[in-house]
Amino acid sequence: MRFEFATATRIIFGPGKISELAGLAPAFGNHGLVVTGVNADRAKQHLSALESAGIACRYFSIAGEPTIDTVREGASAARYANFVIGFGGGSAVDAAKAIAAVAPNSGEPLDYLEVIGQARPFENPPLPFIAIPTTAGTGAEVTRNAVLGSPEKRVKASIRNPLMLARLAIVDPDLTLAVPNSVTAATGLDTLTQLIEPYVSSRSNPFTDLFCVEGLNRAIDALPKAYANGADRLARTEMAFASLLSGLALANAGLGVVHGFAAPLGGLTNAPHGALCAAVLPHGTALNIRALRERAPTHPALGKYARIAALLTQDQNAAPEAAVTALANLCDSLDIPSLRAHGLNANDIPGIVEKAAAASSMKANPISLTANELTEILERAL
Ligand SMILES: [Zn+2]
């Protein structure tokens, strides 16, 4: 057995743990930039103790998912900051992560982007970054990349560097109690996707497998409960933990075809990342299993899909294909719309397939899929 597993983030997890921030933040300096969602009021309320701890905070709000322009503006707002806090969903956390990285470096955010930019290395280390997620979630509090949209190129791509890992992640499930139903469903299915894809990934290892199986076990039980009753504190805690595990798994084992599609789909529509992953998940799973059966029938990923199916159906003898039906049923019960509901149609498919094939997530898919197979996934997901 050989593997590598890295994280440099101090993780503090549990209901009410946000109260520890004021005691820990002064170690990073006395000027903080807080990056948050469109309404900064909630962040201001939860972070008010920072002022009493002698920290001057400037707030930077972002609407929707971060773009190259967001990060350029944020980096200029971070000019006097000693550290950056991301308080919000995956968008705010990723925006903060990218702003912390770009602020002390020269040039444009695009210079540092993979796929569509030059993936230039940093001259200077990023500012210290603290992640406080309020959804469960993207696991962005423990990943080393930030996903940014390029409206001109109509695609999303990452800035990626191990130095971008948060120095501190405070995961307080109580912050997710107010999340509305539709966001609970989309972010929860993103978590589920981020536990399935690293598990079957070509870069998986026994250590990341532990995170995936544990996270799947908890999320499969807790997601319908959190969706049915947002105030279910135990279900919210389970989902926050599953999301954290998904981030640790994907940062070390990569993703796959569903996230390969999420990058170009997210560039074409304003639909949230989780909703797009959810719409593609059953179909990407179906085609992966079919391709493995046809071209690699002894591949270990097939056994892992059988394990996923067993967890989803509670039937220890379930075939890998049973996972597809169970995931489709789960998406139905959580009212996940198809891609057509986000304004996509058949004319978009060839362009999306071409961009997805080049996406960084696609490299870790357990089997290389043909253009026809990628097309079939999208046709089914429409
Ligand atoms: Zn995701």
Image (cartoon, grey):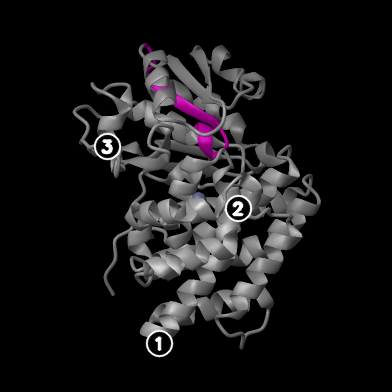
Give the label on residue 339, or none: 2
Q: Where is residue 308 in the image (x, y as percent from the top left)?
A: 56, 74
Q: In this view, does 139 lie to the left or right of 116?
A: right
Q: In this view, does 203 lie to the left or right of 210?
A: left
**Sequence-wise first label, 2 or 1:** 1
Between residue 160 and residue 83, name the one nearer to us: 160
Q: Where is residue 329 in the image (x, y as percent from the top left)?
A: 71, 68
Q: What residue type is labelled 3?
A: Gly
Between residue 255 and residue 12, name the one nearer to us: 255
Q: Which amino acid does label 1 sit on?
A: Pro
Q: In this rendering, does residue 128 appear at all?
A: no
Q: Residue at x 43, y 56 (%)?
A: 350
Q: Which amino acid does label 2 sit on?
A: Leu
Q: In the structure shown, which secondary structural element does the residue marked by tag 2 occupy?
A: helix
Q: Which residue is drawn at 75% across and 61% down?
A: 333
Q: How far apart are marks 2 and 1 (CA)?
A: 31 Å
Question: Circle 3 sits on which residue?
Answer: 117
Magenta segment range?
80-92
Q: In the structure shown, which secondary structural element does the residue marked by tag 1 occupy?
A: loop
**Sequence-wise first label, 2 or 3:** 3
Question: Circle 1 sits on which residue?
Answer: 297
How crowded pointer 3 is (Cα within 10 Å; few <14, some 14-19, many 20+) is rated as some
Q: In the structure shown, which secondary structural element does the residue marked by tag 3 occupy?
A: loop
Q: Where is residue 269 in the image (x, y as percent from the top left)?
A: 54, 41
Q: Quadrant of residue 331?
A: bottom right
Q: Distance between the residues labelled 3 and 1?
A: 38 Å
Number of residue marks: 3
Q: Of discs 2 and 1, which sits in the foreground?
A: 2
Between residue 301 and residue 324, name the one nearer to us: 324
User: Quick check: 155 above or below 363?
Assistant: above
Locate the C terminus and report the quarter of the image it occupies.
Answer: bottom right
